[in-house]
Image: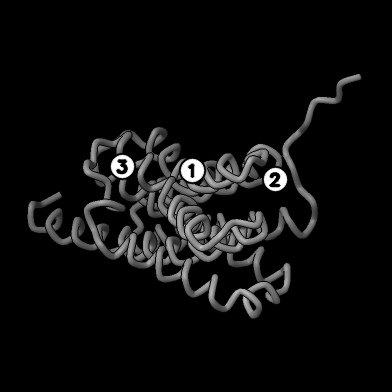
Amino acid sequence: MPTLSIRKVRPNVEAIVLAADLAGTFVFAVEGALSAMRGGLDLLGVMVISFVAALGGGVIRDLLIGDTPPNAIRDWRYPALTFAMGLLTFIFHSAVQQFPVGLVTVLDAAGLALFAVAGVEKALLFGIRPFVAMLMGTVTGVGGGVIRDVLLAGVPLVLHADIYATAAFAGAFVVVAARRSGLPPSLAALAGDVACFVLRVLAVSYGWHLPKASLG
């Protein structure tokens, strides 16, 4: 690829990563705050859980691919967004808690898809091999939720939810496959978003899950 084309593609991918990261941060910050309030935490606890739920996966990804300090620390927009959404969710908790279960599921699927795409795109941008980049997309999508659930003394959702981490990995796989087939980064990211989102929503709707061992 000519040098000029590389220079055009890199800013494009960086813009996609930033947009997906911030959008996913918005969604998971609200979800984290809701989980903290259901657990009976005070305002400080709500803010902490909102922060780790939204940014935990991205921090793990950045540390693993060598992008230090992580964006969540280096870029003020990430903590500002998480704390703002945590505070607003706490203030307007009565209205937020009235959200239908279906809407919460859709928001969660959207956040998972956005983070999975942001994770794999950023890993590819840093020269990580495709399979490991897909794993980085999965870690970005589920990492914050795992930390949230552990802090709230629960079994991480990713270990028992219907097609959760699998949906993130599938979305990341679609991004890599689309990029390999020659699609521009923006269309590849959109394809990955749609694949992850649709798979997660269908899994919840129809109760799809991976095989489980039957003991006893």
* Closer-to-camera residue (99/191): 99
Q: Which mark is residue 201?
A: none
Q: Quadrant of the C terminus?
A: top right
Residue 167 shows in the view: yes
Q: Residue at x 66, y 54 (%)?
A: 39
> Is disc 2 placed on a helix, strand or loop?
loop
Q: Amino acid at mark 2?
A: Ala
Q: Is residue 193 visible?
A: no
Q: Is residue 176 left or right of residue 68?
A: right
Q: Earlier in the sequence, mark 2 or mark 1?
A: 1
Q: Between disc 2 and disc 3, whose residue precedes?
A: 3
Helix, strand or loop for disc 3: helix
Distance (Cα) linking label 1 and label 3: 12 Å
Which residue is labeled 2 in the image?
Answer: 161
To which residue does mark 1 refer?
143
In the drawing, does residue 200 fall left or right of residue 47? right
Please give the label number shown on residue 62: 3
